[in-house]
């Protein structure tokens, strides 16, 4: 009897140390292959078996996508999540969206990131996020913590702003970053907004934003990495202010710029027209308004 109790305690300790569930199901064997045996290929086969057997499908699909990403099979992971998320519970859909966002980022699918982030924001504005609760439990580096709707909205907007930055759509990125800072400001998003303004050649505005970080006016301003980044960006602002303005700020091809300058010289001043980008910003800005 005592030996049995001792063995049970050792088994429990084993599962705690290796962070694997107890039992002998396909999902448990998959986690053992992933975390203990360090055999991702074997883990994939067993995760597939778990999904087909209906064994902890929510966790099996997410874990399988993570392993596929580690094996540089990102496109396959995206297709797997899209194909089998219908087998998962409603509670798992938000986590699966986050897995997809990570996979899209890994393989440079920026348009897909933008569309998914917009969809997640729409769910928040429609009151359908967090399953009607004011907070949700999130996990980072193995630790659990509570996230409010306001914090999640600002986080998603920050990610959306960065996605627009990757597309060099700096005007749209600025709109999104400013909205994020109005909801839940922090120094990291402030630095990104500062970079966005630098890319548009708006050095004075960028300086004001970055000074907020350096003067400790924003949450996270005490963070060494944030302060260092703000200082580096401010140095970049000062160096750019010392040099003449250039159309290179727009990220345009050199030959295109030369052709544009030649056209302007030949035809003289051209009557200002509404840029197409504003047609995109206006409805989106209205959509973001709280």
Image (cartoon, helix red, strand yellow):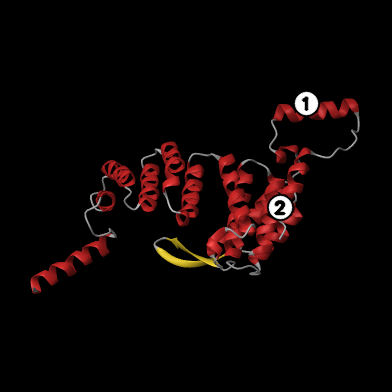
| Dots 2, 1 in contact, CB < 8 A | no
Residue depicted at x 41% and y 47%: 87
> Percent position (x, y) of residue 181?
66, 61
171 left or right, relative to 108: right
Residue 271 falls left or right of residue 59: right
Q: Is residue 127 above or below residue 27?
A: below
Viewer-nearest residue: 50 or 196: 50
Q: The C terminus lies in which quarter of the figure?
A: bottom right
The structure residue drawn at horizontal position 46% and vertical position 41%, both measured from the top left corner, is 82
**Residue 283: image x %, image y %?**
75, 48
> Among all residues in the image, which is located at the extreme bottom?
2
Q: Nearer the viewer, mark 2 or mark 1?
A: 2
Q: Is residue 100 visible?
A: yes
Q: CA distance from mark 2 to mark 1?
A: 37 Å
Tell me the element at label 1.
helix
Check residue 65 in the rendering and tell me which mark sits there, or answer none. Answer: none
Up the image or down, 85 lies above or below 257; here it is below
Whether residue 240 sits left or right of residue 108 in the image: it is: right
SS at mark 2? helix
Residue shown at 57% from the left, 66% from the top: 220
Asked whether residue 245 is in view, the answer is no
Q: Residues within 10 Å of mark 2 (few under 14, many from 20)?
A: few
Q: Which x, y percent locates residue 66?
A: 39, 47
Please state which of residues 106 and 192 is positioned toward the viewer in this rendering.
Answer: 106
Q: Estimate the x, y position of residue 59 in percent, counting from the top left.
A: 37, 53
**Mark 2 — residue?**
287
First along the sequence among labels 2 and 1: 1
Return the residue at label 1.
259
Quadrant in the rendering for residue 270 = top right
The quadrant of the rendering that contains the N terminus is bottom left
How many labels were placed on the picture? 2
């Amino acid at each position: 009897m005592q030996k049995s109790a001792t063995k049970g305690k050792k088994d429990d300790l084993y599962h705690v140390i290796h962070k694997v569930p107890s039992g002998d199901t396909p999902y448990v064997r998959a986690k053992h292959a992933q975390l203990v045996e360090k055999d991702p290929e074997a883990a994939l086969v067993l995760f597939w078996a778990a999904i087909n057997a209906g064994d902890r499908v929510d966790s099996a699909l997410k874990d399988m996508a993570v392993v596929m990403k580690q094996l540089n099979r990102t496109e396959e992971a995206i297709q797997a999540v899209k194909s089998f998320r219908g087998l998962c519970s409603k509670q798992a859909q938000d986590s699966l969206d986050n897995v997809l966002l990570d996979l899209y980022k890994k393989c440079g699918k920026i348009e897909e990131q933008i569309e998914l982030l917009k969809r997640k924001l729409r769910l928040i504005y429609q009151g359908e996020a967090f399953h009607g609760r004011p907070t949700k439990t999130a996990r980072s580096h193995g630790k659990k913590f509570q996230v409010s709707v306001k914090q999640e909205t600002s986080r998603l907007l920050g990610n959306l702003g960065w996605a627009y930055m990757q597309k060099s759509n700096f005007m749209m990125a600025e709109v999104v970053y400013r909205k994020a800072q109005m909801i839940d400001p922090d120094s990291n998003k402030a630095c990104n907004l500062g970079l966005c303004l630098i890319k548009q050649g708006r050095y004075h505005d960028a300086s004001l934003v970055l000074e907020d970080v350096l003067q400790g006016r924003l949450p996270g301003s005490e963070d060494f990495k944030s302060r260092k980044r703000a200082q580096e960006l401010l140095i970049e602002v000062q160096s750019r202010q010392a040099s003449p303005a250039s159309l290179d700020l727009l990220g345009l091809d050199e030959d295109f710029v030369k052709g544009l300058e030649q056209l302007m010289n030949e035809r003289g001043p051209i009557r200002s027209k509404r840029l197409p980008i504003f047609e995109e910003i206006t409805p989106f800005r209205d959509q973001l308004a709280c």
